[in-house]
């Protein structure tokens, strides 16, 4: 059996003998990678070797054994459209409390339309700051350890079509603001501790 690949900063990707003009898609899903996501992904000083990460359009690290938090400098990948880390062991509080911090991490990724953090070990409340990601089409936070109520600010996600926060520890009632989401096709909240909002 092949030994797992430990993601060290200098070993995450080999030093290439040529320059990638534009690295647009990076798929490393379904491997045996362990350890944290290297901050190299957001470090633009590596562009001569790894390509222009500010042009990275899609990043898929799903179904590995990655651990720890999402690197703060992921926001340097400003063209990122799809971010998928499904099926790892990433942990820590889910998103920072302050809006200034989320803007330094995800907020500069203005074209992000798919955010899949499902099947990980994120904990804590779902922060209202996620509503700053106003171009989201699909948000999947299922199968984590998230608690607290669903923020009313989710009503600002005007473009969102799918919200999946099933299999967490969410509580409270559904915010009325979710009714403002005219493009919402699927709202998946099963296996939580929510109290239904009954409208008579």
Image (cartoon, helix red, strand yellow):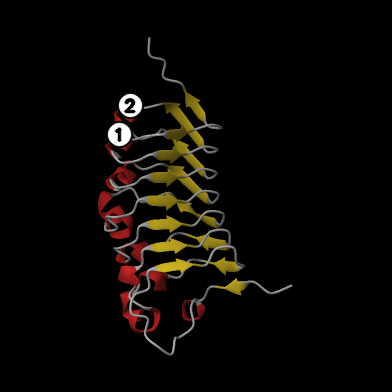
Question: Where is residue 44 drawn, in percent x and y?
Answer: 31, 75
Q: Which residue position holds label 1?
A: 155
The circle drawn on residue 13 is none
> Could you say which quadrant of the image residue 160 lies in?
top left
- The C terminus sits in image quarter: top left
Q: Please, is residue 199 above or below residue 99 in the view? A: above
Pointer 2 local density, CA inside 10 Å: few below 14, some 14–19, many at least 20:
few
Residues at marks 1 and 2 touching, judged by CB atoms closer than 8 Å: yes
| Separation of marks 1 and 2 at Cα, in angstroms | 7 Å
Point 34% across, 65% down: residue:
73
Point 39% across, 83% down: residue:
49
Q: Which residue position holds label 2?
A: 179
Q: Please, is residue 135 above or below residue 6 in the view? A: above
- The N terminus sits in image quarter: bottom right
* Total numbered circles: 2
Question: Where is residue 152 drawn, in percent x and y?
Answer: 32, 32
In the displayed orientation, state which residue is furthest to the top: 200
Query: Residue 181 versus residue 141: which sits nearer the camera?
Result: 181
Secondary structure under tag 2 reads helix
Please state if 69 lies on the left or on the right of 167 as rendered.
left
Please state if 98 lies on the left or on the right of 37 as rendered.
left
> Could you say which quadrant of the image residue 70 lies in?
bottom left
Secondary structure under tag 1 reads helix
Please state if 49 lies on the left or on the right of 62 as rendered.
left
Question: Where is residue 13 drawn, in percent x and y?
Answer: 48, 78
Point 41% across, 34% down: residue:
185
Q: Please, is residue 115 above or below residue 191 in the view? A: below
């Amino acid at each position: 059996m092949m030994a797992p690949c430990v993601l060290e900063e200098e070993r995450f990707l080999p030093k290439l003998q040529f320059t990638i003009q534009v690295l647009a898609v990076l798929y490393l899903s379904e491997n045996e990678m362990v350890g944290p996501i290297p901050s190299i992904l957001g470090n633009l000083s590596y562009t001569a070797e790894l390509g222009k990460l500010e042009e990275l359009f899609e990043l898929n690290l799903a179904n590995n054994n990655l651990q720890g938090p999402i690197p703060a400098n992921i926001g340097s990948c400003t063209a990122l459209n799809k971010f998928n880390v499904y099926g790892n062991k990433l942990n820590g509080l889910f998103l920072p409390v302050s809006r200034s911090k989320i803007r330094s991490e995800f907020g500069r990724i203005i074209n992000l339309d798919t955010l899949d953090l499902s099947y990980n070990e994120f904990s804590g409340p779902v922060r209202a700051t996620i509503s700053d990601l106003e171009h989201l089409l699909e948000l999947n936070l299922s199968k984590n350890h998230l608690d607290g109520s669903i923020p009313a600010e989710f009503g600002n996600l005007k473009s969102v079509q799918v919200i999946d926060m099933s299999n967490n520890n969410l509580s409270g009632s559904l915010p009325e603001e979710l009714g403002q989401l005219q493009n919402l096709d699927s709202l998946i909240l099963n296996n939580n501790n929510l109290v239904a909002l009954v409208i008579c």
